[in-house]
Image: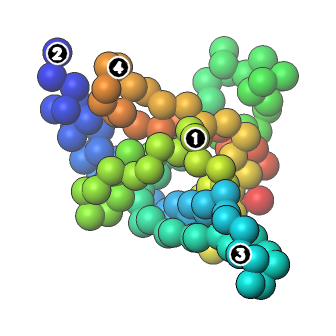
Amino acid sequence: MDYEKIQTLAANQIDDKGRDITIRCSSAGTYDPVSDSIVRTVTDYDGKIVITDYSSRDIDGTVIQVGDRLGLLSPQDDDGDELPNLNIQPDVEFILNSKTLNVVRITSLKPGDTNLLYKLQIRGGEGG
């Protein structure tokens, strides 16, 4: 199956319906003996996200709680370049309208080797 076409369709829909978001990835850091500190590299990516409610059948009160929201994030940045694998990033923040989202879980919809989208479980509303 040609998942790249589905990925393009999903990215186009998220781009069309989504809102601007900043994905901030920080490295785990390396030790700098000169400054006796950990030096981290921070990289920002611009992307698009669609935020919606979970269906009532998905809310179990434990893993998914009342008030949690579902974010659908394109795996590509605004330039069409692939985002780093957000599932394995040591430190990642999602900034929407200058507020950091409280993301409790990141999963990928990834049949085969093609990441179609990221699903973010957002707790505490869209910005806090």
Q: For the residues marked 4 and 2, what is the alpha-carbon distance in whole angstroms?
A: 10 Å
Between the C-alphas of marks 3 and 4, the distance is: 40 Å
Is the residue 109 above or below the residue 100 in the image? above
Question: Label 3, on which residue?
Answer: 32
Residue at point 62% right, 55% down?
92
Distance from disc 1 to disc 4, alpha carbons, whole Å, reads: 18 Å
In what element is the residue under mark 4? Answer: loop
Disc nearer the start of the sequence (3/4): 3
Position of residue 46 measured from the top left corner of the image (x, y, whole percent)? 42, 66
Circle 1 residue: 88
Q: Residues within 10 Å of mark 1 (few under 14, many from 20)?
A: few
Q: Assign the C terminus to one quadrant of the image.
A: bottom right
Which labelled disc corresponds to residue 70? none
Residue at 40% in and 37% down: 117
Marks 4 and 2 in Cβ contact (< 8 Å): yes
Query: Residue 1 got which mark?
Result: 2
Q: Earlier in the sequence, mark 4 or mark 2?
A: 2
Residue 52, can we see it? no
Q: Is residue 92 above or below residue 61?
A: below
For label 3, count other residues whose C-alpha is less than 10 Å away and answer few (under 14), some (14-19) or many (20+): few
